[in-house]
Image (cartoon, rainbow, N blue to C red):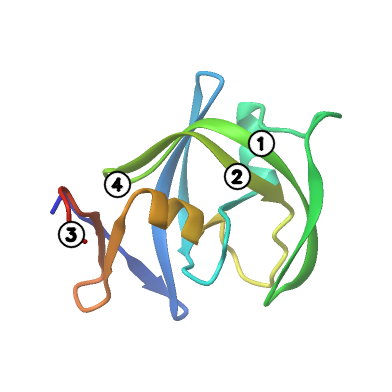
C-alpha cells in the first residue's frame, strides 16, 4: 500500500483535498466529495476560474443527472489531478456551478478512483492506492 490520506467526514459526507494543475497553474481544493456513485469527477466553476479553467467555444457541453437534479457542465482536460499520492495526468473533468445546498468544491468520481486503483478504508477513514497486482 502507498501512503494514505485522511478522509474528513463533515455533515455525514466523506471529504478529501485535491491538487489540480492546469496550464502550469495549480490550485489546492479542500472539501472535495469522495463519491463512488458519481461516474465522473466534477469541479466547481467558482473555484477553478482563478487558474484559468473557464469554458471556451470548443468545450463539450452536456447535462449530468444526480441527486442534486440536472446540471449543465462543460468538459476540460486538465494536466494533473491528485488526492494524496493518487494522481493522474491529462484527465478529463466536468466543470459546473454545483449549487447543491451544501458547500463542496467538487466531486472525486469513480473515473478517478478506478484509474488510480484507490482503496477506501472507511474503518480508518483513509484513502490510499494499491501498489502491485491484486487481481
How far is mark 1 from mark 2, CA to CA?
6 Å
Residue to which mark 3 is pinned: 134
Give the side of residue 118 with respect to residue 60, left or right.
Answer: left
How far is mark 1 from mark 3, CA to CA?
32 Å
How far is mark 4 from mark 1, CA to CA?
22 Å
Residue to which mark 1 is pinned: 76
Splitting the image into 4 quarters, where does residue 55 fall?
Answer: top right
Do the numbered discs 4 and 2 sit on residues whose CB atoms are within 8 Å? Answer: no
Please state which of residues 92 and 42 is positioned toward the viewer in this rendering.
92
For marks 2 and 3 on the same chain, the one whose residue lies earlier in the sequence: 2
Residue to which mark 4 is pinned: 84
For marks 4 and 1 on the same chain, the one whose residue lies earlier in the sequence: 1
How far is mark 3 from mark 4, CA to CA?
21 Å
Q: Position of residue 57 (x, y in %)?
A: 86, 29
Please rate how many residues cluster around mark 3, counting C-alpha atoms within 10 Å: few if below 14, some from 14 to 19, many from 20: few
Q: Nearer the viewer, mark 1 or mark 3?
A: 3
Splitting the image into 4 quarters, where does residue 40 fall?
Answer: bottom right
Residue 103 to residue 28: above or below: below
Q: Secondary structure at mark 1?
A: strand
Amino acid at each position: 500500500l502507498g501512503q494514505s490520506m485522511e478522509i474528513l467526514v463533515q455533515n455525514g459526507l466523506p471529504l478529501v483535498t485535491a491538487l489540480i494543475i492546469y496550464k502550469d497553474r495549480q490550485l489546492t481544493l479542500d472539501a472535495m466529495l469522495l463519491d463512488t456513485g458519481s461516474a465522473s469527477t466534477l469541479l466547481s466553476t467558482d473555484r477553478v476560474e482563478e487558474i484559468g479553467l473557464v469554458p471556451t467555444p470548443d468545450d463539450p457541453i452536456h447535462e449530468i443527472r444526480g441527486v442534486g437534479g440536472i446540471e449543465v457542465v462543460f468538459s476540460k482536460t486538465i494536466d494533473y489531478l491528485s488526492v494524496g499520492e493518487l494522481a493522474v495526468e491529462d484527465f478529463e473533468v466536468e466543470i459546473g456551478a454545483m449549487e447543491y445546498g451544501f458547500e463542496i468544491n467538487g466531486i472525486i468520481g469513480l473515473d478517478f478512483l478506478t484509474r488510480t486503483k484507490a482503496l477506501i478504508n472507511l474503518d480508518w477513514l483513509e484513502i490510499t492506492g494499491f501498489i502491485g497486482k491484486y487481481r
